[in-house]
Image (tube, rainbow, N blue to C red):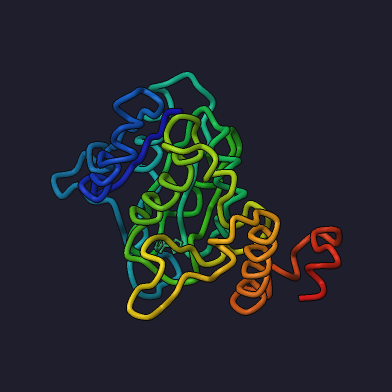
Amino acid sequence: MRIDVVTIFPGYLAPLREALLGRAVGTGLLDIAVHDLRDWTHDVHQAVDDAPYGGGPGMVMRPHVWGEALDDVLAADPRPARLVVPTPAGRPFTQAAAHAYAAQERLVFACGRYEGIDQRVVDHYAASMPVDEISIGDYVLVGGEVAVLVVVEAVARLLPGVLGNPRSAAEDSFSDGLLEGPAYTRPEVWRGHAVPEVLRSGNHGAIARWRRDRALERTAERRPDLIAALPPDALDEADRAL
Ligand SMILES: O=C(OCc1ccccc1)c1cn[nH]c1
């Protein structure tokens, strides 16, 4: 997979070179190219933003700079690409979206700042390629760069060979529509807190049941929306008895 990121703060994407992702990049599983949007400005001030039509606070990122940048970035590789634009106004990014993105040959991320990017940029490219405006949560960041780090990590860990232990991606939180339950490791007792007995019983049926019950309890408590979203056949009678 090839990933391109266009941003006015390339340094913000440095963490992509670290550890897990750094290794994936090093082994060729993932190509990441970060581009400075200002390289496509021509004025001495390298202006990338301007006042919003209609008035209002803040600035909007100018369409023509983005157009020149994205045209060049897209032309640099023949593989079909999906343009991803993080914004508080986007569709929620979920684990399902991460799986869909992991199947893409190429992702191009446009990092908005200020009040965002002139809408005509998204509208223009949407006519010739898939474009997703996505939100990583209901809060406002200063720019899209941090959201790109989140999305790239969620996607890259699903790529075969990137994660040390492939099984754990399959048993992720959300893989069965529920939150992950509590996890424990040695010592057996820590500051007077003992590990739940069943987990040391060796009874794998009871352990699976206990884990499912904890996941259901936690999900019902913290994310009733996920319970409501479960397909009708997702809960068996043992689940319902909980
Ligand atoms: O703040 C975010 O993106 C940066 C951004 C982009 C456009 C205008 C303002 C800020 C964001 C929040 N949840 N998901 C993304």
From the viewer's perspective, is residue 96 above or below residue 241? above
Q: Quadrant of residue 17?
A: top left
Left or right position of 76 against 101: left
Q: Total marks drawn?
A: 0
Q: Quadrant of residue 218?
A: bottom right
Identify the residue at horizontal 76%, vertical 62% (top origin): 230
Which residue in the rendered view is the most extreme toward the top?
Answer: 78
Left or right position of 118 against 34: right
Ligand 1 falls in quadrant: bottom left
Left or right position of 102 against 228: left
- Which quadrant is home to the C terminus? bottom right
From the viewer's perspective, is residue 144 above or below residue 27? below
Identify the residue at horizontal 52%, vertical 27% (top origin): 105
Q: Quadrant of residue 93?
A: bottom right
From the viewer's perspective, is residue 201 above or below residue 38? below
Q: Nearer the viewer, residue 116 or 162?
A: 162
Q: Measured from the top left, where is residue 97 in percent x and y? A: 59, 48
Q: Measured from the top left, where is residue 172 in percent x and y? A: 56, 51
Q: Measured from the top left, where is residue 111 in percent x and y? A: 37, 50
Which residue in the rendered view is the most extreme toward the front?
Answer: 201
From the viewer's perspective, is residue 236 above or below residue 225? above
Identify the residue at horizontal 85%, vertical 58% (top origin): 233
Q: Nearer the viewer, residue 65 or 172?
A: 172
Q: Nearer the viewer, residue 223 or 217?
A: 217
Identify the residue at horizontal 51%, vertical 60% (top origin): 135
Q: Nearer the viewer, residue 8 or 46?
A: 8
Left or right position of 191 against 157: left
